[in-house]
Amino acid sequence: MQDIIKQAAKDIFSAKKAVALTGAGISVESGIPPFRGKGGIWEKFDPMTFGHIDTFEKNPAQVWKILIKDLKEIIDQAKPNDGHKGLAVLEKMGILKTIITQNVDGLHQMAGNTDVIEFHGNCAWQRCMDCGRKIKTAEVDISVMPPRCQCSGILRPDWVFFGESIPMASLHRSQQIASACDLMLVIGTSAIVQPAAYMPVIAKENGAKIIEINPEATPLTGKISAYLVKGKAGQVMNEILKEMEQLI
């Protein structure tokens, strides 16, 4: 294990234009449950019902009560863990340029990363469906359902519901960044949800080295990634940064 940590530290330290692709696994350590998989939110609720824009538009109060309210309370309390903080350190070092994330919790920005592409939007902010005003989720009054903007419009998470398209600007920029990087860290994602899962493929096809940090193997392992560092994101990032200190 220590040999692969040393290799990862060396590869990251040598990168000139590294990017990271992150998924729910990096935020689980901050107490945020994943949407998919064991213990995920979609085990409790039907995603095509409570996660669909049609349901929200027909009955926003119901979706707020069943899904968004509890998630808001979790995210309000969540703090960046060592995985998030480690990526922020890599940015400060000038190595990591951009994060492409499937997460909606805003923890990368809270940790200090400044260039974060959010494929699925952000639950840390709510958007008025009438005037478009954005309000921090932590500041939203949920004593009345559904919560409303000062213009009386209904507030909705600034995320992508099922039935909505990923912002084309985010997709195009992610493709451009993936094709131009020389190293991509794939952290906490099963790499099965498209189009995010295709970013490592684009990166590899353009000559980048792909390093996975995940507890288990994924469809990328042994095919797209150069190697897999098994473990939790926070612990692995701490070990990698410790090795990088020796290189410095």
Image (tube, rainbow, N blue to C red):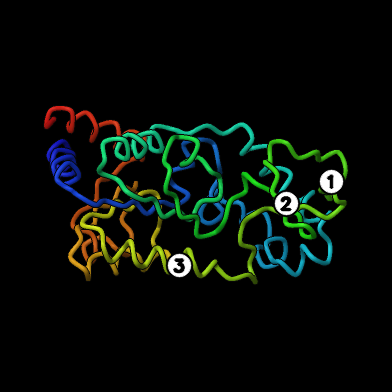
Q: Considering only vertical position in the picture, is 6 above or below 98? A: above
| Left or right of 166 on screen, residue 226 | left
Residue 25: where, in percent of width, then height?
Answer: 44, 47
User: Which is nearer the eye, 151 or 157?
Assistant: 151
In primary-sequence order, the first of circles 1 and 2 is: 2
Asked if the residue at tag 2 contacts the one at tag 1, i.e. Cβ–Cβ closer than 8 Å, the answer is: yes
Residue at the location (25% across, 58% down)?
Answer: 181
What kind of element bears circle 1?
A: loop
Q: Considering only vertical position in the picture, is 77 above or below 59? A: above
Residue type, label 1 = Gln
Residue 238: where, in percent of width, then height?
Answer: 29, 31
In primary-sequence order, the first of circles 2 and 3 is: 2
Residue 162: where, in percent of width, then height?
Answer: 63, 67
Question: Real-space Cα distance between discs 1 and 2?
Answer: 9 Å
Dot 1: within a 10 Å radius of its alpha carbon, few (fewer than 14), some, or many (20 or more) residues? few
Q: Residue 231: name its quadrant.
A: top left
What kind of element bears circle 3?
A: helix
Residue under label 1: 150
Question: Real-space Cα distance between discs 1 and 3?
Answer: 32 Å
Residue under label 2: 133
- The label shown at residue 171 is 3
